[in-house]
Amino acid sequence: MSMYEGFIYAQQITCPAGAVPYTIQAGDTIYRIAGRLGTTVAAILALNPGINPNALQIGQQICVPGAAPPPTCTGTTYTIRPGDTFYAIAARYGISLQALIAANPDVDPNRLVVGQTICIPTVTPPAPVTAPCSALLQPVTASLPPAAQIPTGAAVVRQVAMSTREYTVVASALPEPGTLGNFNGYVAVLSLLAETGQRMTVNIRLGSSQFGTQTVAWAGSTITAPPPVPGDTVEVRPANIATGRQGPALLRADLGTCRT
């Protein structure tokens, strides 16, 4: 065995200067061998005028140009079994399909051969998803009607992916929106600092929870990208759902104080 994996120097064949013997493995094609060794199909065929490139046999020896080693696998090797697909293998090892394809540039994912060896790359695990955090909503008493109950609530931020978060707002003891004007619901208004450095506004329509005929809570959620930073706020406002008109804030929180 030579120092280059995949090359076997046998006595059965003698290759011309500048070429070395190569033993056909499961799944090999002239195209794949050329890609693996950094050469061309034409160069390999020129060294092997007597072979049928469409009928290669496992264990058959051919001559290939040079002695460049095949690509190094930076992970572990895996031998294809009956029923395997790249999608299933990627899922089994917890890597993306794209990472598996990139680690095996000479392998056709649609033509896997039982016994063929592929590379399972070592992939850096993603950063852990952070725990949810919450901020208490404080009443804006100046906006409440006389003798109204003091509302309470909270905003919860939960990371759902590497770059997206779920913002959930829950409020209770809010007055019926119709008592505040031409309103028929509530919205939570997020003011978030976007990656562009500009502020973005996100409206969350709040749905009501009933106990009998009495509304006991309003809640809603949305998924968006920016994480909460100091200066970000959430406000609960009465709204006319049909026209989009909003009233004054009844509850407010600074999302920069969001704590786990």
Image (cartoon, rainbow, N blue to C red):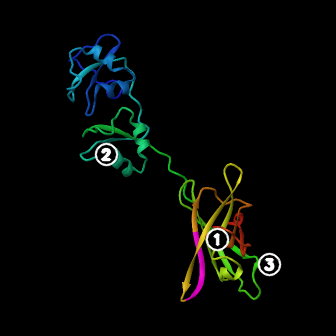
Which residue is at a point 52% across and 51% down the rendered structure image? Answer: 126
Q: Which mark is residue 5?
A: none
Q: Which mark is first along the chain, 3 or 2?
A: 2
Q: Which mark is residue 142?
A: 3
The answer to whether residue 46 is visible is yes
Q: Which mark is first along the chain, 1 or 2?
A: 2
Tell me the residue that label 2 is attached to: 85
Quadrant in which the N terminus appears: top left
Which circle, 2 or 1, is nearer the viewer? Answer: 1
In terms of image quadrants, where is residue 137? bottom right
Place of residue 245 in the rendered image (x, y in percent of width and height, measured from the top left): 68, 69
How many residues crowd mark 1 within 10 Å: few (<14), some (14–19), many (20+)?
many
Q: Is residue 120 above or below residue 162?
A: above
Is-magenta flag for residue 218? Answer: yes
SS of the residue at dot 2?
A: loop
Find the distance from the CA under tag 2 to the CA under tag 3: 64 Å
Amino acid identity at mark 1: Val
Which residue is at a point 38% across and 51% down the rendered structure image? Answer: 91
Amino acid identity at mark 2: Thr
Tell me the residue that label 1 is attached to: 187
SS of the residue at dot 3?
A: helix
Which circle, 2 or 3, is nearer the viewer? Answer: 3
Place of residue 146 in the rendered image (x, y in percent of width and height, measured from the top left): 77, 86
For the residue pair 65 and 85, the one nearer the viewer reads as: 85
Magenta extent:
213-220
Lateral position of residue 19 relative to residue 207, left or right: left
SS of the residue at dot 1?
A: strand
